[in-house]
Image (tube, rainbow, N blue to C red):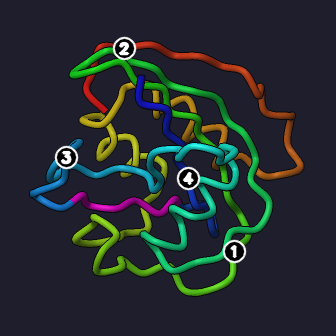
Amino acid sequence: MHDCVGAMLVRDGRVLLGLRSADAAWLAGAWDIFGGHIEAGESPEDALRRELREELGVRAGALHPLGELTGDAPEAWRLRVFALHDWAGQPLAQPAGGHDAVRWCTLEEARTRLLGAHPGFATLLEQALRPRHAASIDPNPHIHTGTPR
């Protein structure tokens, strides 16, 4: 099973998405959130902090769990998704990060762009974009699909 992590970077009511490179192993040419595989010995949070440095050149602040998505196509995978509201650095697509572009999107834009990545992103987007003082986020929502990650 591919064990992965991803972050929804949120600022001013928008979420940052990345356009995956045309030669990416997963979701080539699709809009996606940022993250990647958890390496041996890493916690999900440590893996996500590493991935955000590699893909965007930022140092993550507090990570807030949103839930997880799973699927079985083309192979079994699990993606643990976090919201990130605070970071150091300017998020820019890094040359070796696997993204051709980054874009700040409204909720509606993000929903549309992420449909190809996973239908479960819509629920997690709404949670990520809630004001931080709003009702607490369910840390254990689970959405399964056969859609490729």
| Image location of residue 23, percent across then percent down | 10, 57
Disc 2 crowd rating (10 Å Cα; few below 14, some 14-19, many 20+) is some
Q: CA distance from mark 4 to mark 2?
A: 20 Å
Q: Earlier in the sequence, mark 3 or mark 1?
A: 3
Q: Which residue, given by chain and number where applicable, does mark 3 sit on?
A: 25
| Image location of residue 80, percent across then percent down | 58, 35
Q: Main secondary structure of the magenta part?
A: strand
* Side (left or right) of 142 relative to 95: right
Question: Quadrant of the rendered structure where residue 85 is?
Answer: bottom right
- Which secondary structure, mark 4? strand
Residue mark closest to the camera, 3 vs 1: 3
Q: How many marks?
A: 4
Vertical arrangement, residue 71 with respect to residue 20, above or below:
above
* Side (left or right) of 86 relative to 72: right
Magenta segment includes 16? yes
Q: Nearer the viewer, residue 36 or 69?
A: 36
Q: Which residue, given by chain and number where applicable, does mark 1 sit on?
A: 87
Q: Nearer the viewer, residue 71 or 47?
A: 47
Question: Quadrant of the rendered structure where residue 126 is?
Answer: top right
Vertical arrangement, residue 61 with respect to residue 58, above or below:
above
Q: Which residue, given by chain and number where applicable, does mark 2 sit on?
A: 145
Q: CA distance from mark 1 to mark 4?
A: 12 Å
**Among all residues in the image, which is located at the extreme left?**
22
Vertical arrangement, residue 11 with respect to residue 8, above or below:
below
Residue at horizontal 24 percent and vertical 58 percent from the top: 20
Q: Which residue, given by chain and number where applicable, does mark 4 sit on?
A: 8
- Which secondary structure, mark 1? strand
- Amino acid type, residue under disc 4 in the picture: Met
